[in-house]
Structures are given as structure tokens and as C-alpha cells.
Amino acid sequence: MSEHTPAGRLIVLTGPTAVGKGTVEAKLRADHPEVWVSVSATTRQPRPGEVNGVNYWFLTEDEFLAKEQAGEFLETAVVHGMAHYGTLLKPVEEHLAQGVPTILEIDLQGARRVKQRATELGLEVVYVFIAPPSFEELKRRLIGRGTETPEQQARRLETAKVELAAEGEFDVTIVNNTVDQAAEDLWHVIAKEYGL
Ligand code: 5GP
């Protein structure tokens, strides 16, 4: 199989801030280590416990813009008006070419950008939306995790409202009621796409 005929469809996972995407992904990976989640580049500061090359590639703005200029990204976005985020194209193509179930966890702008470029890049994609049980629950989770200042929380909630309105653009919605159930639902999507 050539590098340009991926075996399975790329899984693009999007959902509003604090919906629990990271936790769902961690559970999925613990249960199914054969899944690969792309490591994005970002210019935001690492949170306590985050490791370079594991959670993100933490880059300076200059480093990020140089890679963008060099065409190394599948997509990029400025998220919450704060920091650059981007998916590096090469590792995604390599994993897909090897038939590895491949997931991007990116924001709505990024998902839309992938949609625009998918045909040109010969990528087949399934778009998955992770939704909270309700907006109130999302607010509770965001405030509860306590990793953002009140000002950052307010900005993230504004972004979340916009993202929630875009659910209809996705192929599949998974409601994150519990981590176990959401991870299981996500696995079913992947298993179907990759014939596992
Ligand atoms: P956080 O700063 O909480 O890790 O992530 C903030 C937002 O950035 C999340 O909505 C996450 O999905 C998004 N994000 C993470 N990596 C990427 C990426 O490579 N591209 C895009 N477009 N968004 C990303």
C-alpha cells in the first residue's frame, strides 16, 4: 500500500472546552493501545504535569510560525484567541499508511480546515463531535477543574457556545455522560472504520 492510500479513515475528534475529550481519549488508549492520537504543536504554556512530545510539542511562536511557513501542518488555528495550535501532517500520513487507527483531537476551526483540505490531501475522514450532557454541566466541569483563571473560563465558555452550535457539521455525536461509556462509543466508531 502506498503512503497515499490510507487503510482507514482519519478520526477527527472535536468538542467544546472541558467536555472531557482528554479523559475519554486516555481511557480509550488505556483500553486500546493500538490507537494513535496525534501530538499537536502549541504555543501555549504547559500545564502542570504536561510533557513535551507527549501531550503537545510546546513551541515558541517563532518556531510555530516557521513550521507553518514550511507547510508542515495539516491544519492550524488560534484557539480561545490565545495560542496557536496545529497538527503536523507527516506523522498523520505515516500512521494512516501503516493502517494505525489515527485520531486528531482538534478544535472546530481545525476540523473545518481539515474538511477543506481532505480531498486535496487524499484523506478520508470521519468527524466525531463530543458533546456535554448540557451546557450547565460543561460550565460545572470547566470551573471544577480549576486550571483557568475566571477570565480564561469566560472566554472558553464563549468559544464553547459557538462550538456546540456546530454539532450538525459532524458525522457522529458522542455525549460524554460518563468517561467509560464515551470511550466505549468512540471505540465502536473506530472499530467500524478500521474493521477491528
Ligand atoms: P487545551 O489548551 O485545553 O489543551 O486545548 C484547547 C483547544 O485546542 C481544545 O479545543 C483542543 O481540541 C484544541 N487543539 C488541540 N490541539 C489542536 C490542534 O492541533 N489543532 C487545532 N485546531 N486545535 C487543537
Image (tube, rainbow, N blue to C red):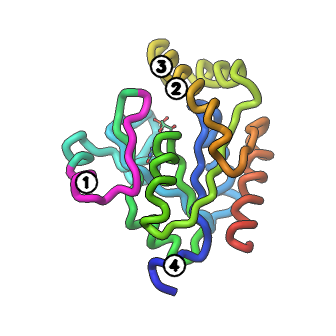
Q: Is mark 2 within 8 Å of ligand 1?
A: yes
SS assignment at label 3? helix
Name, please, the residue furthest toward the top.
150
Segment tinted magenta in the rendering: 66-80
Q: Earlier in the sequence, mark 4 or mark 2?
A: 4
Count residues near mark 4 (Cα–Cα under 10 Å), then give few for <14, some for 14-19, many for 20+.
some
Q: Nearer the viewer, residue 188 or 50?
A: 188
Label annotation for residue 155: 3
Image marks 1 and 3: residues in contact by CB distance under 8 Å: no
Q: Nearer the viewer, residue 163 or 174?
A: 163
The residue that label 2 is drawn on is: 159
Give the total number of marks visible in the rendering.
Answer: 4
Q: Nearer the viewer, mark 4 or mark 3?
A: 4
Q: Position of residue 125 (x, y in %)?
A: 58, 61
User: How many angstroms separate mark 4 from mark 3 (CA)?
Assistant: 40 Å
The residue that label 4 is drawn on is: 5
Q: Residue at x 36, y 43 (%)?
A: 42
Horizontal relation, residue 122 to residue 8: left or right: left
Image marks 4 and 3: residues in contact by CB distance under 8 Å: no
